[in-house]
Image: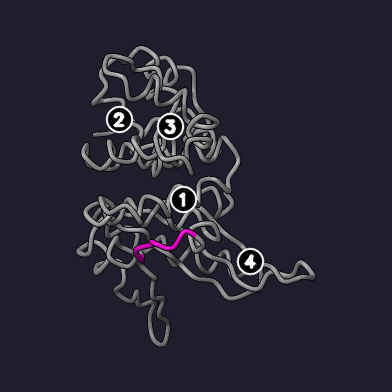
Amino acid sequence: MPVERRADSVVVVRDEAGAATLAVIVEVQRGHDRGKRFSWPVYVTTLRSRYKCDTALLVICPDRAVARWCRQAIGLGPGGVITPLAIEPGDIPLVTDPEAARTCPELAVMSVVAHPEEAEDGPVLEALLAGLTTLDEDRATVYLNYVFNSLPTVTAKRLEEMVTTIQDFEHLGEKYFSHWLAKGRTEGHAEGEIDAILSVLETRGLEIPDDVSERIHQCQDLDQLRTWVRRAVTVTSAHELFTE
């Protein structure tokens, strides 16, 4: 099976002529898993052989302890070592400059999620919204759903107010998010959360089997649905949504 099917994600950087210059394997790791110390080198060497270029393993971690474990060098035997690169929330910069957010809206999204306390400050949320205005409707909606479901209630309420009341962002709320704000944030309405889960899975290119879709649509528990929204961002298959 191709390495792309085993790793969470593979990104290949190419030059103007189309030649691969760097291949990056992206993995999400939530805890210690000794088996990864043996499977990760396989990903790296297989991808390096396939694209004939430098290859890196990038691991996204939920906290510092897991990142510390992931960063440990993996010895392959005499003279052979692979050292994963690991990112935890503390490594993600705080984006407060709207222009920087427009240049890289995904970084602005991760900035808000990684720094929820600082996100209560207006400039952080304003930068996020500035970045979202540069995106197409589907992607902007997915990102905003992810942010709303990751932030503390008070901060999420502040963001909702900004989208609907600040003149600079009113058009953004009306054009992209009015449906979500009307349904996903209204007590007792689960449709917005269901749409968010399915949108995230579809945007990430994951197959949604009929049994998964049926279970999601039948759920009316808002807390459970919001948990599935958060999981949808990192799972490698739709069935993993239901793994406790």
Q: How many marks?
A: 4
Image-quadrant location for residue 80: bottom left
Q: Is residue 221 above or below residue 134?
A: above
The front one of 61 and 129 is: 129
Residue at 33% in and 76% down: 73
In whole angstroms, how far apart are the C-alphas of marks 3 and 1?
A: 13 Å
Closest to the camera, between mark 1 and mark 2, is 2
Residue type (three-letter) at the residue carrying disc 1 = Asp
Q: CA distance from mark 3 to mark 2?
A: 15 Å
User: For mark 1, what is the residue?
Assistant: 8
Q: CB under 8 Å between callouts 3 and 4? A: no
Q: Nearer the viewer, mark 3 or mark 2?
A: 2
Contact between marks 2 and 4 (CB within 8 A): the answer is no
**Residue at image point 39% right, 30% down:** 239
Residue at the spot of label 3: 238
Label 4: few (<14), some (14–19) or many (≥20) C-alpha neighbours in 10 Å: few
Residue named by callout 4: 13
**Tags 3 and 1 in contact by the CB under 8 Å rule?**
no
**Crowding at mark 1 (Cα within 10 Å: few <14, some 14-19, many 20+):** some
Q: Is residue 13 above or below residue 122?
A: below
Q: Earlier in the sequence, mark 1 or mark 4?
A: 1
Q: Which residue is mark 2?
A: 226
Which portion, as a residue range, is magenta?
Answer: 93-98
